[in-house]
Amino acid sequence: MTRSSDAPSTTSRTRLRQLCAVALVVPALTLAACSGESAVTADPTAPATTTTAPATETATPTTPPPAAVEKVSYKNINAVIKDPDLGHTITATRIARHLKWPAGQPVGAEQFEIVGVRVRFEAGTRYSATLDPSMLSLIAANPKQTVPSTTEFKGLWSTKDLTKATREQWSSGWVFFKVNRGTTSALTLAFNRPAYQVSTTDKAINAKTFTVVLSK
C-alpha cells in the first residue's frame, strides 16, 4: 500500500480560570472558562484511567510470528471522539501496524508490536483545557490490554509527532503504542479526560473516558 507522505518510516481536577477575551498562559492542566464561571482545578488524586498490560502477559494463545516476517500495514480511517463538556474533538485518520523496531532493541521487538495512529487534536473554545497525547490510550481486544501512548519512539522515524493543543488551537501528528506481540486487529482509541472542579460555583466536570473503534 502506498503510504501518505507523513506516514512513519518502516526503517485529575485541574484549575480552570475565567477568561473571556484572552487565553491564560499557565502551568500544565490549568484551564480558563469564558462563561462567568470561576477557577476549576483538576484532582491530582483521581485514579488513573489507564492501565498497562504487564510485559510478562501472554501475547496470544498461539505462538506469534517473529517480528522479521511481519509486514508493515497502513489503513486510512475516520474515527472521531467528541467531548461535549470541554468542546474537544479528537479524530484518528490513519493507523499503522507492525512498525519496524529501532535497531538495538531486540527484547522489545520480540515482546511488543509498535502501533502508530495519526491523530488530529482540536481543543475546545470554552475552557483553556489542553489536549495532550498522554491522555490517549489504546485498547486491544485480544489479548485484552489497555496501554498508554509512549514517547519512547519520538523522533526515531521520519514523521511528525502529535503535540499538545491548547484552547482554540489544533495539532496533528502520530502517536505510538506498544501492544503485546500477536495482538489481533480489534483496536479502540481512548481519550482519558481528567476531572475538573469549578471552585467558586462548585460545578464539577467528572473524569471520563471516551472511546472510538479504530479497527475490528
Image (tube, rainbow, N blue to C red):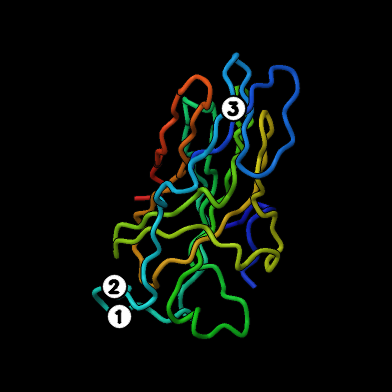
Q: Front-most of 79 and 58?
A: 58
Q: Front-most of 88 and 158?
A: 88
User: Gap between marks 2 and 3, in whole Å?
Assistant: 47 Å
User: Gap between marks 1 and 3, in whole Å?
Assistant: 53 Å
Q: Earlier in the sequence, mark 2 or mark 3?
A: 3
Instruction: Residue 17 in the image: state x and y as whole percent.
Output: 63, 27
> Which residue is at a point 34% across and 62% down the rendered structure image?
184
Q: Amino acid at mark 1?
A: Thr
> Which residue is at a point 38% across and 44% down the rendered structure image?
213
Instruction: Residue 111 in the image: state x and y as whole percent.
Output: 42, 78
Q: Which mark is residue 60?
A: 2
- Residue that numbered label 1 is attached to: 63
Asked whether, in this view, residue 45 is left or right of residue 169, the answer is left
- Residue that numbered label 3 is attached to: 39
Instruction: Residue 204 in the image: state x and y as whole percent.
Output: 44, 27
Q: Which mark is residue 8?
A: none
Q: Residues within 10 Å of mark 1 (few under 14, many from 20)?
A: few
Seen as rendered, the residue at the extreme front is: 200
Q: Amino acid at mark 3?
A: Ala
Quarter-of-image position of residue 206: top left
Quarter-of-image position of residue 140: bottom left
User: Gap between marks 2 and 1, in whole Å?
Assistant: 7 Å
